[in-house]
Image (spheres, coloured by chain):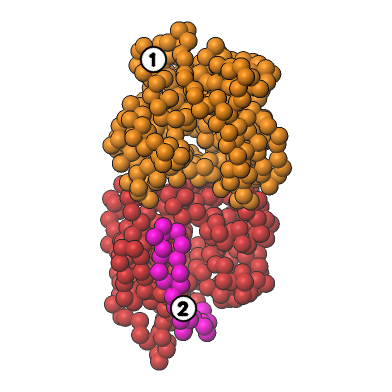
Chain colours: A red, B orange
Amino acid sequence: MSLLVIGSVAFDAIETPFGKTDKIIGGAATYISLSASYFAQPVNLVAVVGEDFPHNDIELLRSHGVDTEGLQIRIGEKSFFWKGRYHNDMNSRDTLATELNVLGTFDPVIPNAYQGCEFLMLGNLAPSVQQTVLNRMFKRPKLVAMDTMNFWMEVSPSELSQAIAMVDMLIINDEEARQLSGEYSLVKAARIIRDMGPKFLIIKKGEHGALLFHGANIFFSPALPLEDVFDPTGAGDTFAGGFMGYLAKTGDISFDNMKRAIIYGSAMASFCVEKFGTERLIGLLQQEISDRVSDFIMLSQIDMEFIS
Amino acid sequence: MSLLVIGSVAFDAIETPFGKTDKIIGGAATYISLSASYFAQPVNLVAVVGEDFPHNDIELLRSHGVDTEGLQIRIGEKSFFWKGRYHNDMNSRDTLATELNVLGTFDPVIPNAYQGCEFLMLGNLAPSVQQTVLNRMFKRPKLVAMDTMNFWMEVSPSELSQAIAMVDMLIINDEEARQLSGEYSLVKAARIIRDMGPKFLIIKKGEHGALLFHGANIFFSPALPLEDVFDPTGAGDTFAGGFMGYLAKTGDISFDNMKRAIIYGSAMASFCVEKFGTERLIGLLQQEISDRVSDFIMLSQIDMEFIS
């Protein structure tokens, strides 16, 4: 089934204890689309970049089965840019620069060819833009998931609440879940957030894995224990892309299938952090992905026959 | 098969955001023994208390199948006492008082009836005392596990290294693993620690679960997501007690069985934090334990047939 992704396509400049990059391709929709492309093609992309965005990077997306008809290129304007530096523990970072540029006036246009998409991933963007996208879909998708961040909770809480009330699933990290709900306990936070509208909630805990909530059910998937995390940028979006891509591939939104999708999302995120930016998500082999999924199975699954 | 536990039996005074206690029964060996008693009885206990230790608390241990022949009662002396206050996030605590008392001169004596024990859990104590216990066993147990803490890494690093080199398994938390190895990455830390001697290593991550390392294998078990953690005191020892108790019950030290033992240990720890001190570990029903284990299975296990 088909997947539509909206979000930022942008430049990042990243510093980690292992080194630093110049401006490289980044943005939520970039990571989501590349990751999803290993499961469902085409990935239909709605985003905006400036004239400065390299043709090569657009070609890179296309070569991974990303349909870029919905990617607006604004002549005479500049692409969104983020610059950040990670601390030694890789769990916290300082934002050194944010230049909104084209994102400040983004008016998302859905190409006709994208209408009828059954899975919609609203990557982190202004909640008003997320709402606009959903309102411009002629038919409600089978599953609508969205991400957000602390910034929107502070700057536009009412638009954010409206957007959250419209979607089936929220995918956010633990810090965001705590801020959004005002509760430290993630179990309590999950109840409050689901009372805001979404039937499904995923709370990403970075190196500590991810939790899926639905009804009275909770599922937990670990992150793969790694020798080194080289660059965590985009890991959360890569997780979301693998998760939504696997659902779009299988077309099955049962809780059991979402468990599997979380394993695939976690596997994709474990690749992402191994190199700078999107580097490790380029040209991955299906065999590498299934080997990595097997690592997750070995890591977390037990012989269940012992329960008496 | 039989289990021998050494460690502190003591008084604790605990403050959490939910309330505070007077002096209540605590100590590593208390939590380990109570937890293990739900799987293997008798639990043979080697420890020391002062004349001030209530007869009722010793009876409590006995009523849970703990053999107290190895519990020394020192007339005219006082029991070990710890007083601590947890912060709001429950992940950090301040020690307000530590009175070593009888533990300062503890000379562990192994009753003849305890010789031949096949499972030995060396709870957190001075590493020289841990070594003495192992040296006083006539026959090497099938599995020797030990816990330790940051204090011994600073105060007696060489005795600690000697003790670690003697055991089959080390069970410590993530902070301790990082300090012991000098490595932040737990995968790297695990390699360094196993090079010190133990074939098996468990790294406890509190609310983030636990990792088991052996050879090239890693297994991860989550902690149960809880509404509230009422009091984390003793959760790590309760985990170790459930783990060792399950191994002693089954007599099987294969990696696959250790995975199951970790689920049981995690289930026991999830009870421990629900009330102050040992309160929730008293008089647990087997049905409560199997229901809790089922919760863990629901939380972490998937239908594995999908892997192609």
Q: Residue at (46%, 72%) from the top-left corner?
A: A95
Q: Which residues are magenta?
A: A84-108
Q: Position of residue A210 (x, y in %)?
A: 50, 51
Whether residue A275 sits left or right of residue B79 in the image: it is: left
Residue B205 shows in the view: yes
Residue A98's disc is 2
In the image shown, does A184 or B71 lie closer to the viewer?
B71
Q: Is residue A106 magenta?
A: yes
Quadrant for the N terminus of chain B in the image: top left
Q: Residue at (63%, 33%) from the top-left corner?
A: B12
Tag 2 secondary structure: strand
Whether residue B38 sits left or right of residue B148 in the image: it is: right
Q: Position of residue B182 (x, y in %)?
A: 35, 47
Tag 1 secondary structure: loop
In the image, residue A62 sits, relative to residue B252, either above or below, namely below
In the image, residue B235 sits, relative to residue A254, either above or below, namely above
Whether residue B105 sits left or right of residue B11 in the image: it is: left
Residue A300's disc is none
Tell me where residue A162 sits by quadrant.
bottom right
Q: Position of residue B175 (x, y in %)?
A: 45, 45
C-alpha distance separating marks 2 and 1: 65 Å
In the image shown, does B194 or A191 lie closer to the viewer?
B194
- Going by the numbered disc 2, the residue's amino acid type is Thr
